[in-house]
Image (tube, helix red, strand yellow):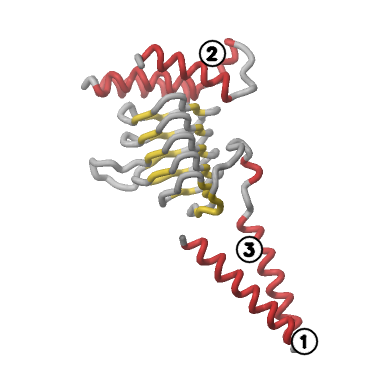
């Protein structure tokens, strides 16, 4: 596919991914993510043709206009949509496959000063929630979903959901609707509820020395151990 065809497909993809897009005027002034990707495609062609300084100038100007920082050496596939886009950073050796959805504030960053592959690979169909930081030469699997403001430093399997700081996989199986970020579980709430129940059981044991309550406490202990084991994986 040629450069013009790729950019045309990016523009068409915006209409498919955002129901708020109602007119060409909206598209011109309110979709910096689409324009950033379009100019990236021009700069990337220059970059791989060894016009690296010119490519960096193009993306530097694009960053000023869109507040999106994409290194021209990154590899971005087809129909990648950056929604809103403010604050998105994509490093030099990052690889983004087709049909990835990226929200504002996402960083695909490196954790090494080596010259080799040091930025993430995001596989086909993944969704990166607002503010997510994906760091290092790790892979985000196909159709995986990263929760908003998560910090991902380990690989995420295909069809999995990861949240938290640092991020942990809390669900496997492809999400029916990748846009429903409000359906992500609240790990902190679940742990807090566990602690309240645990304290209540221990208080009853101290007061009543009840064998049945002791069994409940042992059952909660098993739940806690399973929870900790899942967090370490």
Compared with residue 194, is residue 10 higher up or lower down, i.e. above or below? above
Label total for image: 3
Q: Earlier in the sequence, mark 1 or mark 3?
A: 3
Q: In the rendered image, which residue does mark 2 sit on?
A: 28
SS for callout 1? helix
Q: In the rendered image, which residue does mark 1 sit on?
A: 207
Q: Is residue 82 left or right of residue 23?
A: left
The N terminus is located in which quarter? top left
Residue 124 image offset from top left, x and y in percent: 44, 35
Residue 131 image offset from top left, x and y in percent: 52, 40
* Residue contact between numbered discs 1 and 3, judged by CB atoms under 8 Å: no
CA gap, disc 2 to disc 1? 69 Å
* Location of residue 29 by image quarter: top right
Question: Which residue appears at 65% of the width and 75% of the height?
Answer: 219
SS for callout 2? helix
Q: Earlier in the sequence, mark 2 or mark 1?
A: 2
Question: Which residue appears at 31% of the width and 36% of the height?
Answer: 93
Residue 19 image offset from top left, x and y in percent: 64, 22
User: Which is in the foreground here, disc 2 or disc 3?
Assistant: 3
Residue 27 image offset from top left, x and y in percent: 56, 15
């Amino acid at each position: 596919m040629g450069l013009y065809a790729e950019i045309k497909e990016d523009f068409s993809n915006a209409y498919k991914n955002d129901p708020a897009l109602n007119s060409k005027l909206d598209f011109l002034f309110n979709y910096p993510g689409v324009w950033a990707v379009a100019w990236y495609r021009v700069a990337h062609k220059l970059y791989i043709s060894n016009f690296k300084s010119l490519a960096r100038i193009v993306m530097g100007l694009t960053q000023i206009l869109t507040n999106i920082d994409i290194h021209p050496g990154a590899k971005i596939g087809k129909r990648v949509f950056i929604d809103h886009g403010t604050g998105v950073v994509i490093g030099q050796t990052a690889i983004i496959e087709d049909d990835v959805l990226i929200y504002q504030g996402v960083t695909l960053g490196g954790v090494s000063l080596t010259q080799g592959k040091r930025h993430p690979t995001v596989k086909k169909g993944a969704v990166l929630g607002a503010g997510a930081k994906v760091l290092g030469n790790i892979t985000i699997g196909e159709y995986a979903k990263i929760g908003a403001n998560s910090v991902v430093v380990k690989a995420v399997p295909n069809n999995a959901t990861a949240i938290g700081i640092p991020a942990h996989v809390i669900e496997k199986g492809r999400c029916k609707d990748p846009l429903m970020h409000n359906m992500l579980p609240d790990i902190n709430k679940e742990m807090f509820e566990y602690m309240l129940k645990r304290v209540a059981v221990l208080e009853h044991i101290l007061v009543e020395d009840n064998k049945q309550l002791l069994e409940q406490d042992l059952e909660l202990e098993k739940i806690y151990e399973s929870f900790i084991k899942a967090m370490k994986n």
